[in-house]
Image (cartoon, helix red, strand yellow):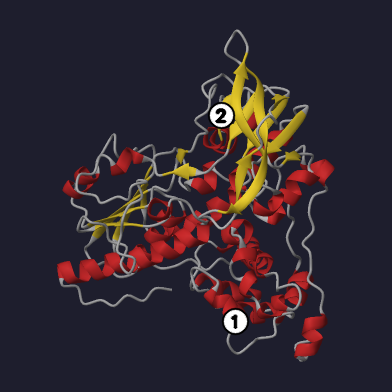
Amino acid sequence: MSGLSIKDRIKIPRHKAPEQPPEVRSRNFEEVCLGFGLEEAKEEALRCIECPKPSCVAGCPVGIDIPRFVKLVGEGAILEAAHVLKEKNILPAICGRVCPQEKQCEQSCVIGKRGEPVSIGKIERFVADFERLSGRVELPKPGASTGCSVAIVGSGPAGITGAFELARLGHRVTLFEAMHKPGGVLYYGIPRFRLPSDVIESELKALEYLGVEIFKDAVIGKALSIEDIFKMGYDSILLGTGAGLPKMLGIPGENLVGVYSANEWLTRLNLMRADLFPDYATPIEYGKNIVVIGAGDAAMDGARTSIRLQPEAVTLVYRRSRAEAPCRVEELHHAEEEGVKTRFLTNPVRFIGDSHYKLKAIEVMEMALGEPDSSGRRRPIPIEGSNWTIECDTAIIALGCDINPLVTRSTPGLELTKSGIVVVNTETGMSSIPGLFAAGDVITGGSTVISAMGQAKVAAKGIHDYLVAKKGLRLQYAAV
């Protein structure tokens, strides 16, 4: 089949990875997508027409050589394909599961302009899983010691990537993580049915192999400041604390018992395993009717974790229409398959409590769509007199996050935007403080795993160049 013409390749239908049936998966926290098998992955890879100017590479925030790794899969050289992936992406099993490929590499796929694009994300996941399960994972080697030390604050995608790149260059790297497990948003923000714990743990082993030291339960901005870390002898610091301050609605009743932010809800279930109470001593209180407000990926995660707790009903409320929902199309499809009800063009006005200050209902009003706003989506406009109530005893507000000010406000001289985002040189990642760099959501206000990784690679190069100049090191940056 490797000798197929372009015309024959285009005729191959896109393969769909098998999934747990909705009626089964809605009652467990096991992974929903079961992934490609070897033959499915090879056949899907053969759909790539190996175009001379592969726009899919430009659509990847970390610049993976997509045609090369896909071609190797089509030839059955899976471990070789894994090596190509890891030249640019140290977390392929994670990215293959959670990245919005339909808005990145797959959106740029040439054959997708006349049909369905190559399923690049599912192939990436297969390759990474194949390598992991084969027991022949190629672990990176630390570079020759430079004598320089770098501290990284936050062990999410940006922090992990920065640590990996810098350790491979021979710098001594220490990660400071506020939670009791490294991984950041990968652990606390993404449900296990989308990203299993063993996948995260497997990909984090590379840091251990590289000699990266990890301090957990280290809340920078409280226990230690950025200034304290510099005084400890670190030559440079990378700030990768993400965006962890939940946005709220600012309407009456938001402080009632039963009203959660998506951050708290997902952290309790994903990281603290409230779903396994009493085996884990971290219960979460919820009622019969759960309402999730928003339509981003966090809202989908909130709704889909809720349905697995088996309440009587889970309803998603969003002020715009389905077409404007910022979540992955696949996530909304999965949520509805699993039994989540949706009410679009509906916006909360106030939370209503009982005499014990417990949530019992939400007053909402209907919306209409006007002209597009700054986001490019049509602006929701209230319809006067359309108010009504939804009975519920649990509400999850999933409107995205702002930058957590714990570190930024405790760092004098750090330049921020009006919204609290750290200002950096986009070519180097350096902030207004010499030696302090930043990457990920803390410089964007919220983005994707792979985008944070791409920014961390830029910052790692910036740190290395800074240390070369500062210490007079005769080294060249060779990011892979």
Residue 329 image offset from top left, x and y in percent: 70, 55
Residue pictured at 48% horizontal, 71% vertical: 88
**Residue at mark 2:** 260
Badges 2 and 1: C-beta atoms under 8 Å apart?
no
**Residue at mark 1:** 68
Residue pictured at 29% horizontal, 78% vertical: 476
Which residue, as the protein is rendered here, is positioned at the far top?
A: 355
Secondary structure of the residue carrying tag 1 is: helix
Name the amino acid type tagged 2. Tyr
- Is residue 167 positioned above or below 312 on the image? below
- Is residue 155 positioned above or below 225 on the image? below
Quadrant in the rendering for residue 397: top right
Q: Say if residue 372 shows up in the picture.
A: yes
Instruction: Tell me the tag on residue 11.
Output: none
State the quadrant of the N terminus: bottom right
Q: Is residue 366 left or right of residue 266?
A: right
Q: Say if residue 283 shows up in the picture.
A: no
Quadrant in the rendering for residue 11: bottom right
Q: Is residue 314 left or right of residue 108?
A: right
- Number of residue marks: 2
Secondary structure of the residue carrying tag 2 is: strand
Residue pictured at 60% horizontal, 32% vertical: 396
- Is residue 366 positioned above or below 3 on the image? above
Q: CA distance from mark 2 to mark 1?
A: 45 Å
Query: Mark 1, residues whose alpha carbon is within 10 Å: few (<14), some, or many (≥20)?
Result: some
Residue pictured at 16% horizontal, 68% vertical: 471
Q: 240 and 183: which one is in front?
A: 240
Query: Mark 2, residues whose alpha carbon is within 10 Å: few (<14), some, or many (≥20)?
Result: many
Question: For the residues carrying marks 2 and 1, which lies nearer the camera in this image?
Answer: 2
Name the amino acid type tagged 1. Arg
